[in-house]
């Protein structure tokens, strides 16, 4: 063979260098499927009913369409800072969230539902 005793280390080093050059897929957070959310708030945005809720197994403020086959389509982050961000986990609803003025009411109503639930839990 003639590679010498350091061949495994050189091979691993070359492999690591090659991996550093290409983007690798990462596992995204997936929404809970077929599980009931504890609904904290409901509103109508863009002619659709939207629910905000939590789930013990996946503690986030999830956003869902109750009438959809896969109801949960995303979640909100950044709630403690008062600047929520909408993270869409179901790409089939991404166009709807970006259409018109749907994103801002989603974030505003979600933040309001979260603050109301927090006040209720703290007493």
Image (spheres, helix red, strand yellow):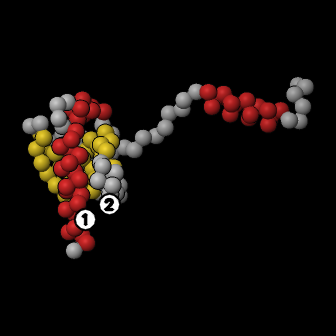
Quadrant where the N terminus sits is top right
Q: CA distance from mark 2 to mark 1?
A: 15 Å
In this rendering, position of residue 101 left or right of residue 26:
left
Extreme residue in the bottom direction = 123
Asked if 51 appears above or below 70 in the picture, the reply is below
The residue that label 2 is drawn on is 56
From the image, state whether disc 2 or disc 1 is nearer to you.
1
Give how far across and how far down residue 90 sits, in percent. Answer: 30, 37
Q: How many marks?
A: 2
Which residue does the image show at 23% across and 60% down from the upper left?
115
Q: Quadrant of the C terminus?
A: bottom left
Q: Earlier in the sequence, mark 2 or mark 1?
A: 2
Out of 81 and 74, give the one closest to the viewer: 81
Alpha-carbon neighbours of circle 1 within 10 Å: few (<14), some, or many (≥20)?
few
Dot label at residue 118: 1
**Residue at coordinates 42% horizontally, 41% vertically from top-left?**
28
Q: Is residue 36 visible?
A: no
Q: Is any atom of residue 104 visible in this view?
A: yes
Image location of residue 66, percent across then percent down: 16, 45
In the image, residue 81 sits, relative to residue 74, either above or below, namely: below
* Residue 12 position in % (x across, y down): 74, 35
91 sits left or right of 109 in the view: right
């Amino acid at each position: 063979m003639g590679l010498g005793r350091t061949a495994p280390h050189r091979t691993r080093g070359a492999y690591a260098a090659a991996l550093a050059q290409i983007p690798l897929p990462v596992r995204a957070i997936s929404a809970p499927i077929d599980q009931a959310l504890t609904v904290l708030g409901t509103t109508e945005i863009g002619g659709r009913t939207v629910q905000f809720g939590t789930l013990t197994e996946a503690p986030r403020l999830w956003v869902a369409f109750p009438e959809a086959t896969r109801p949960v389509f995303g979640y909100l982050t950044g709630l403690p800072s008062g600047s929520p961000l909408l993270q869409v986990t179901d790409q089939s609803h991404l166009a709807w969230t970006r259409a018109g003025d749907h994103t801002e009411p989603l974030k505003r109503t979600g933040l309001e539902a979260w603050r109301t639930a927090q006040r209720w839990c703290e007493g």
